[in-house]
Image (cartoon, grey):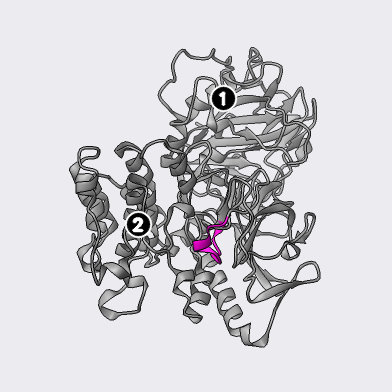
Amino acid sequence: MNATGGLPEEGGGATGNGGKTETNPGDAGDDKTVIVSGARAPSADAPPAHSVLPPGTRLGEFEIVRLIGEGGFGIVYLAFDTSLDRYVAVKEYMPAALASRVGVTQVQVKSGRYEPMFRAGLKSFINDEARLLARFDHQSLVKVYRFWEANGTAYMAMPYYKGATLKDTLRAMKKPPDEAWLRALLTPLIDALAVLHASDCFHRDIAPDNIILLEESHRPVLLDFGAARRVIGDMTQALTVILKPGYAPIEQYADVPSMRQGPWTDHYALAALVYFAITGKTPPPSVGRVVKDSYQPLAKLAAGRYSDRFLKAIDHALAVSPAHRPQTDRQFAAELGISLDDAQAARASSGALARTARRRIGWALGAACVLALAGTLGWLAPKFGSRVPSADRVASETSAVAVVASTASAASTASAPSVVATEAPPAPAALPPFTPDGEFARIVSLADPSFDVKVDVPVARAVVDHDLLRFALTSNRDGYVYVFVVDPANQYLQLFPNALDSDNRIGRKKRLVLPRPNWPMQAGEPVGANHFVAIVSAAPREFPALGLAHDAVFASLSTEAQHAAAAERTLTASPFAGVPACDVKAPSCPVAYGAATFKIDVVRSSR
């Protein structure tokens, strides 16, 4: 995860700046990903230093860069994905009490009597955590890129998030957050839970240390489920390892038919989190409340500082009996005065929907090329056997076409079919209303004037099922190319680099023709204007504020995510332009970039 954090526990976190693992003794042995700050010593339950994979170790396409964090059940590393040229977080299943490192990479169970527990934890790590998280695509759920078994253990690769845990954020506040802040926190979290709950999945490990607030957008992301920890703890009857007093409701302490787990289980933990944010302490442990309930309602403790409706909703969700709490996510949200977006909950609410999306944005290997389908984007891969022009031919065709846009310098006056060259607009006095194509133009206006980027487009009016997408870029400086497109249906995609083509380097005054032959794209529905922005950056870039979903050939950005990122715009920066992401060992990290916009109209007929 791109992070001052990654995937950890309240005890067992990691900073993106090399901080040591932070451990809360009460949570020792947690297998969550860790986000840490400071330099506290790791707990005694953390894996010994010799268990940590050294920098340079290769795990498939991933090369270990350094340690992010470690806990009693897992180790998280910053790694470089050599196939896609990006940094990721790799989490390794490593229950320190049950197994140890043999050689450089191999993990071996310490004793035969530990074998059943180790295997049960491994199975849960894969099936109840990695495989489960990989099914969902929600900006407030940690994304799993892939998972695999090797070296006697298992791994999962995830985004490398930059941010701070909610626990650390609350600690840094001089006074409790206000109601507006809490609502902004709860809205995406409840919506993420709605996605899980719609598939009969439950998080069961919500707490302030298990939520990261992203560095730029402050969007909350629920970290992993601690599945292996729960399974091993259950086998050893170690409830103190499995549960977090104050956050765990009564139904998590025993398997009682009359107290089954459900959405209300996560509601309790989320409400306990709010209780902690307001009062600075957790509610009394639920198991003790069954005998004598010493709970003090927020409606009394915080009266006058928050709305009565909001406080009563939290109190309702903290009822001891599961039957006395809100039963659905929409009920809980409504009581809090929060309106959930039905479309977003439906978008990723089931594995079937996720599979459908992958089919729409899938690819298949042919004898001569790899074909990429771009969902409902107005560009589709041609059928096998379709004529794919060579790069040389595309270059010759584009050489006579106009420059559509260029960074800060006047656009070329050469003619291009139905495309008008534009100048980069001056920085506005106030932020304009957000539109994707408007933000593309703003990216150009904010670019470095010394960075001159040109785009040549041979076909600016493309016919459905006939014309191929093609354009060529040139830059007056070496750099890295990023191309985004928004189609008439507002589908926002990172066209390049993509899962099929990660080599996005461009040389000074060298022509880069896209798409490359291994991912040809043909015009398709919907018809209308397709707006593009091409960014050439002096350094590799990442786009942490966008919450891009990397679950298909082209990373995508939902409409909701677009508007969430738009809220982070300033007069001098656009989150849609990304930020430089240099190697941790790089002596410097240049921020300069150039950009150009262009437009291609997709039509049904050339008439």
Mark 1 highlights which residue? 443
Q: Earlier in the sequence, mark 2 or mark 1?
A: 2
State whether residue 240 is above or below residue 589.
below
Image coordinates of residue 105 in percent, x first then y, are: 76, 68
Magenta portion: prevailing SS class: loop
Please provide percent x and percent y for residue 419: 56, 22
> Of helix, strand and loop, which one carries label 1?
helix
Q: Label 1 amino acid?
A: Ile
Q: Left or right? Give the position of 62 relative to 600.
A: right
Residue at x 64%, y 20% (from the top left corner): 406
Query: What crowding class fits label 2: few (fewer than 14 Cα within 10 Å), some (14-19), or many (20 or more)?
Result: many
> In the figure, 535 relative to 300: above or below?
above
Residue 457 is marked as none
Marks 2/1: CA–CA distance: 35 Å
Looking at the image, residue 281 sits to the left or right of residue 22; the answer is: left
* Left-right relation of 84 to 199: right
Q: Is residue 392 left or right of residue 241?
A: right
Q: Quadrant of residue 307?
A: top left
Question: In this figure, which residue is indicated by the disc labeled 2?
Answer: 194
The amino acid type of the residue labelled 2 equals Ala
Viewer-proximal residue, 89 or 480? 89
Question: Could you classify mark 1 by the number of other residues whose Cα lies within 10 Å: few (under 14), some (14-19), or many (20 or more)?
Answer: many
Q: What span is in magenta?
A: 23-33
Query: Residue 148 appears in which quarter of the rendering?
Result: bottom right
